[in-house]
Image (spheres, helix red, strand yellow):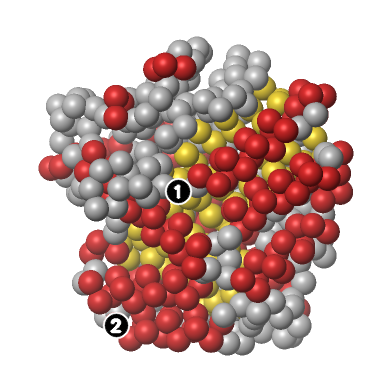
Amino acid sequence: MVQPPFVLEPESEARGFRKYVPHPGHPRIAGLDQTDIETYSMKIASYPEVVRVFDQWKAQLNEPFYGITTDGQRKEGLFGIDDEGAPVEQMVAAAKEVEAVLSEEELRVVSHEIDSHDWRKWSNPEVLIFQYGVRLHTLTPPKIVAILKLVEASLSEAGYRKVVTAMDLNHFLGELVNGAPILNRHSYQFAMYGIQSTTEPWGFSLTGHHMCLNIFIVGKQMTISPVFIGAEPNEIDAGPLKGLTVCTDEGSYALQLMQTLPDQLKRKAQIYTEMYSEKMPPDRWNPYDQRHLGGAFQDNRIIPYEGIKAIDMPSAQQDILLKVIGSFLDLLPPSPFEARMRQVKKSLNETYFSWIGGYGDKDPFYYRIQSPVIMLEFDHHSGVFLLNKVPAKHHVHTIIRTPNGNDYGRELLKGFRGGNGGVRATRTWPTKCSGTAFRIN
């Protein structure tokens, strides 16, 4: 695993990703073409340093869900039930088509109750930590197509393109490092929750390396959160998909914002000048999440506000900030997107922007945008399969979280039940996946 870097490479050594692609016999990628995801995951999960991290993650997962907060106290009443124009009819039709093509056994594996603990078992590494659904690569092409049509029906055109591009980039990485069995466009796990209905709450997840979606819907309202989208590298520079990139707007808009802030606000927003610093507290950086605070298994983390308030920015920079937020939320279909942006704008007086790293055109960086109703993170990482030891702009991670309890649509679910006498809808499949974990303890 990557060790913490203390110095950055010179700028001339930090451009492009091809120079960091390991040769076929390199220890980091040796044997990847001769393994499968289960064998690979068991091997990684046997390393003592990984066991320690996985044990910590499992302990956090075992805590009852509460939600990300700034001080340990959840703010209530932020998320009400409303008609926000979600495309529920198209989503339900697509979900029914998935049910029609899956076998009875596959349906048992993917089907969960709406408030199942398995929602929270997503993770973005290539390692399969928990099994709670079906892997796309084990399915026939018509079944994969049906699942992707459900994803497409649930997102905007740009959002679906972003998701599919992240999957294509994962496949490209597999080709680069000779690791296609574990890194490909179908190395993702699919699960469904609740009863697919235009009135009952339901949802689904599609999760794997560098692409994790959790989508909850009730009536005409939906939540896409938590979300993780990234890539290593974040561009395809050869072959029929040459030119594809992902998460470029999230980076370029934020850099424009940081570069155009008044100097005094730049200094206040930049909470650390280096991507790794001995000044950071022990829990601020780790080799898995690096600077991210809201990654997998962090559902209940206390994350205080940092940086500067949006309302202290000049109006032009507030506009750029909203463009940054929109570049994350463009996953949503048009009407839910507009509803979510209205919610975001209402909280601008308690929206904070913080930055780590430099803000020159070539500098890698991290930033976070955080308010009572949204938390967005962007991070440039050091290499995992590629060999750059320091953060580089070709390795990107982004995260969407909904603080104060509405990850996985939990607050909407609570509101729905409150308005329906607390009646809980349950699935009728004979069994459901238990969320098998690889044995590491």
User: Residue at horizontal 51%, vertical 72%?
Assistant: 154
Classify mark 2: helix, strand or loop.
helix
Left or right, 345 with reference to 401: right
CB under 8 Å between discs 1 and 2: no
Is 402 in front, or is 177?
177
The label shown at residue 101 is 2
- Number of marks present in the image shown: 2
Residue nearest the observer in this picture, 144 or 159 = 159
Q: Amino acid at mark 2?
A: Val
Q: Identify the residue shown where x is 25% and y is 61%.
A: 137
The residue under label 1 is which amino acid type?
Val
Would residue 51 be seen by someone viewing this image from the given angle?
no
Of the two numbered discs 1 and 2 on the same chain, state the one appearing first in sequence. Answer: 2
Residue where numbered disc 1 is placed: 246
- Residue 75 pos. (x, y %): 81, 55
Is 155 situated left or right of 126 in this image? right
Query: Counting other residues with Cα less than 10 Å from the Cα at mark 2, is it few (<14), some (14-19), or many (20 or more)?
Result: some
